[in-house]
Image (cartoon, grey):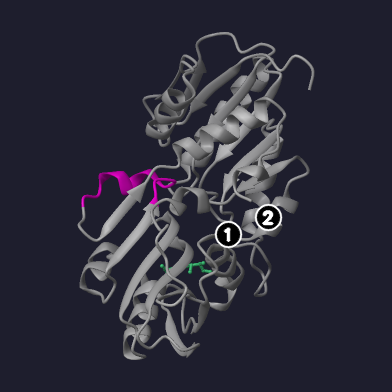
Amino acid sequence: MTNPGEIKLISGTHSRVLLEAVSKYLGIDLCDHEVTRFRDGEIRVQVKESVRGHDVFVIQSTEPPSDNLLELLLLVDAVKRASAKRITAVVPYFGYARQDRKDQPRVPISAKLIANLIQVAGTSRVLSLDLHADQIQGFFDIPVDNLYATPVFKGYFDNLDANEDLVVAPDVGATKRARAFARRLGNVPIALIDKRRPEPNKAEVVNVVGDVAGKRCLLVDDIIDTGSTIVEAAKALIENGAKEVRVVATHALFSDDCVEKIEKSEIAEVVVTDSVPRVLTLNHDKIKVLSIAPLIGDAIRRIHEELSVSSLFI
Ligand code: R5P
């Protein structure tokens, strides 16, 4: 892109803490903007300085409530109408990603609809983190950079030992992620949990595939929602002789009584990122929160300078 203008950093109210951390990391002042409410509750956004001809990054995770998504769409619309040169929607947690196919009659493909909305609002490109399914990139007809959180976790787990530690996928869908994680953290072997869902939000372990006896297990997942998956998996691993179970996951939704479940479980530690900001209000001995601001900051810098983004995590 010729003359990409300056980087302009904006966010919805929800991702404001991340915005400030990214701005500090990059040494770039925030673009003056506000997100407020009309008396009836409707969202009102305004960008208070010129973004004409500039490279604008709008940061917002889009887990419920849906106002988070709406703030993102309205901000993108505002900068589009203010003649920004390029608009990147930075969506660390991409909500509705788990509804990515028509797996029952008369259900929507929600992830596709959300992708359409983000694109139609005027987004030029998307930057996300650990999308639930890689194919969601194909729901957009604009470039999508899907970062992996591995560099964020790498420093924390740099002492894994291939003889003692085991990376465990908590369900079949997580196998590819677990294998990549294990490779980047010292070629640690992997095991697999055969999970089924008897009903939504409930997880049941059918089988543990692999010899976990005497091992320190690290369960790797993209999302912790109700916590059922990791708690049931940890229980099965301990029953099968594992010495210790820790969990690493990118997006901490922590719905319902998830934190209480973790507290009472066999899990020794849960390491997550701050992609879902709610987690920042938690202060819990078992839960460690790592910041994604440097990773997002580096990606923003690279996008702006037209450099490779994948080199951040390969
Ligand atoms: C499922 O495909 C995801 O990767 C997670 O395992 C799932 O969303 C976790 O949900 P919960 O914490 O409610 O079991």
- SS at circle 2: helix
- Around disc 2, counting alpha carbons within 10 Å, would you say few (fewer than 14), some (14 to 19), or many (20 or more)? some
Residue that badge 2 annotates: 136
Q: Residue at x 40, y 76 (%)?
A: 164
- In the image, 252 versus 139, the foreground residue is 252
* Image quadrant assignment for residue 240: bottom left
Residue 66: where, in percent of width, then height? 48, 45
Residue 256 seen in this snapshot: no
C-beta proximity under 8 Å, tags 1 and 2: yes
- In the image, 104 versus 4, the foreground residue is 4
Q: Residue at x 44, y 27 (%)?
A: 25
- Around disc 1, counting alpha carbons within 10 Å, would you say few (fewer than 14), some (14 to 19), or many (20 or more)? many
Three-letter residue code for mark 2: Ile
Residue 207 drawn above or below residue 266: below
Q: Residue at x 39, y 46 (%)?
A: 274
**Residue most toward the top?**
50
Residue 292: where, in percent of width, then height? 45, 42
How far is the residue under mark 1 from the one under mark 2? 8 Å
Three-letter residue code for mark 1: His
Q: Is residue 265 left or right of residue 192?
A: left
Read off the magenta span.
Answer: 273-283
Disc 1 CB within 8 Å of nearest ligand 1 atom: yes
* Image quadrant assignment for residue 89: top right
- In the image, 104 versus 261, the foreground residue is 261
Residue that badge 1 annotates: 132
Magenta residue check for 275: yes
